[in-house]
Amino acid sequence: MKAGLVGAAPTRMTLDPNLPYIGVDGGVETLLSQGIMPMVVVGDYDSLKDKDCLKKIRNIQLPQQKDDTDTAIAIEYLLSNGYNDIVLYGVTGGRIDHFLAVLCMLKKYRDHSLTVLDEQNKIYILKAGKHCIHKNEYRYLSFFTDQDTYITIKGCVYPLDQYLLKNNDPLCVSNEICDEICEIEITSDVIVVQSNNKGGI
């Protein structure tokens, strides 16, 4: 089953009203501003401005001192309730450490489908094997790995043939899909970042 998760970081994206949602702390305000009632809200509510909004919503109050982030607990809640396809909004802005923690969750639950979306990026894990990646609105793409992988890329401006990508190698940053689909073959899992803006550092 598919569900959405909305974190407290600001987002201007229009959410899919057909998905069931979990709000994470201040993320409930984003949901309510778009007329979406979450099925549950999770958090210690340190980023929630209007706590009165919780009165009519099922919510799980978390302590401020805990071993997991609010987002991690929300992901685990969804997975334990049968949602194995999760789209995460509002988790890329603000504190970098919390975003890195989200990437840890993508790797921890790589056997499920977790996708991070914001106004510019789409981030997900791609399992070892052969894949087709559709451009849609994301024409630029980058690959990162936490374990050595041989990578072959076809249909991009910078093709590769059995290149050994290591976890400290940034070579696969900011490639560009030539047409509508590119092909990739990898021997280990990779993190894919698709972007709709070429801007970089």
Image (cartoon, rainbow, N blue to C red):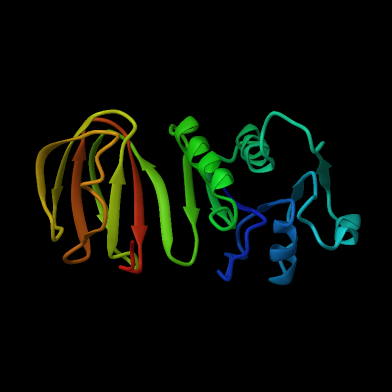
Query: 136 above or below 107?
Result: below
Mark count: 0
**Quick one: quadrant of the C terminus?**
bottom left
Q: Is residue 1 visible?
A: no
Residue 183 horizontal/vertical position (percent) = 18, 50
Residue 56 horizontal/vertical position (percent) = 89, 57
Q: Quadrant of residue 80?
A: top right
Q: Nearer the viewer, residue 163 or 185?
A: 163
User: Left of 49 or right of it: where is 76?
Assistant: left
Q: Is residue 127 visible?
A: yes
Query: 10 above or below 95?
Result: below
Query: 54 above or below 100?
Result: below
- Residue at 53 percent across and 55 percent down: it is 92
Residue 16 horizontal/vertical position (percent) = 57, 64
Q: Quadrant of residue 187?
A: top left
Q: Quadrant of residue 10?
A: bottom right
- Residue at 47 percent across and 36 percent down: it is 112
